[in-house]
Image (spheres, rainbow, N blue to C red):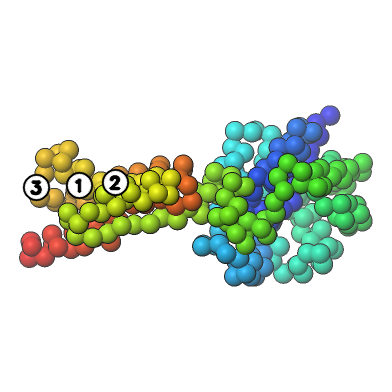
Amino acid sequence: MKKTGIIFGKFYPIHMGHVDFIQKASGLIDELYVVVCSDNTRDKDLFKKSKMKKMPTIKDRLNFVESIFKYQNNIKIIHLAEDGIPFYPNGWKLWSERVFETLLKNNIKVDVIFSNEPQDVENYKNNFLTLPNSEKVFSKNLKIQTIDINRDNFPISATEVRNSPYHNWDFMPKPVQEFFAVKVAIIGTPHSGKTTLVHKLSNCYNTNFVEDYKKKYSQKNNLKNLEEKDFQHIAQKHQEKISKSIKNSNKLIFIDTEFCSLQANLLELDKKRK
């Protein structure tokens, strides 16, 4: 018989401890559902108390998890909105009812719940199995299995990541690193040394840089004067190079010129036409 497991978490943000936990659980059953939980009020409050530069939305968090496990077909990602329910560790009854509704809607029946919080084992049993019609979504032999309680492989928590994301950089999976990488744009007049400065900074911080694509485009096509259609192509290619370079950056990335400068060039071109 096929066995289905489930894991609940905020994953705010997902870190390597979470990834290790999910990987271990996925090897113990046939199909694993990872439930990403959100609450707008709680999530905003966690962000305000954190040292994160920008707030990951629920869409961002779902994308993180989906990107990490996209090649593992037995891992499925679903969303659980917890708005209106008292925050953990309170609100178990209301939360269990919300979980039941979500699982029923998605036609999911659970055999195993995985957790790394021993105190939750009895709460899962007492709240899930006492729900009316619980057998529709939970096996009568429902098992609560704890994994990696001591966080031996990755001694990190999401709270620690939020409070010091750049200090805990190596605990972040690649998609999360890409999200938090700081983009530093160097702007200035032509021939002011921007390119040289970008190269020096990237060397000092051991990270990537993005060249001024407008300059490269003009040289490649032997153009002295650019037209409006050129700027659209330049902006698109420049963004593509930023997105590609940021994938392997070291906490930050330096960019030679940015979109405000391109926009200013285009406005200057329009003025000359008038």
What is the secondary structure assignment of the residue under circle 2? loop
Q: Distance between the Cα atoms at labels 2 and 1? A: 8 Å
Look at the numbered discs 2 and 1 and tell me whether their residues touch, using CB distance below 8 Å.
yes
Q: Position of residue 96 (x, y in %)?
A: 82, 58
Q: Return the x and y of residue 116 as percentages of the image width and height.
A: 80, 48
In the displayed structure image, the side of residue 121 where residue 154 appears, left or right: left
Quarter of the figure that contains the C terminus: bottom left
> For the point 35% across and 44% down, which residue is it?
241
User: Residue 22 appears at what percent x and percent y?
Assistant: 71, 41
Quadrant for residue 263, please give it.
Answer: bottom left
Residue at figure coordinates x 82%, y 67% from the top left: 90
Gap between marks 3 and 2 measured at Cα: 19 Å
Q: Is residue 149 left or right of residue 228?
A: right
Identify the mark at residue 224; answer none if there is no mark: 3
Tag 2 residue = 211
Tell me the residue that label 1 is attached to. Answer: 215
Judge by depth and name the residue closer to the eye, 15 or 87. Answer: 15
> Does residue 39 sit above or below 10 in this rendering?
below
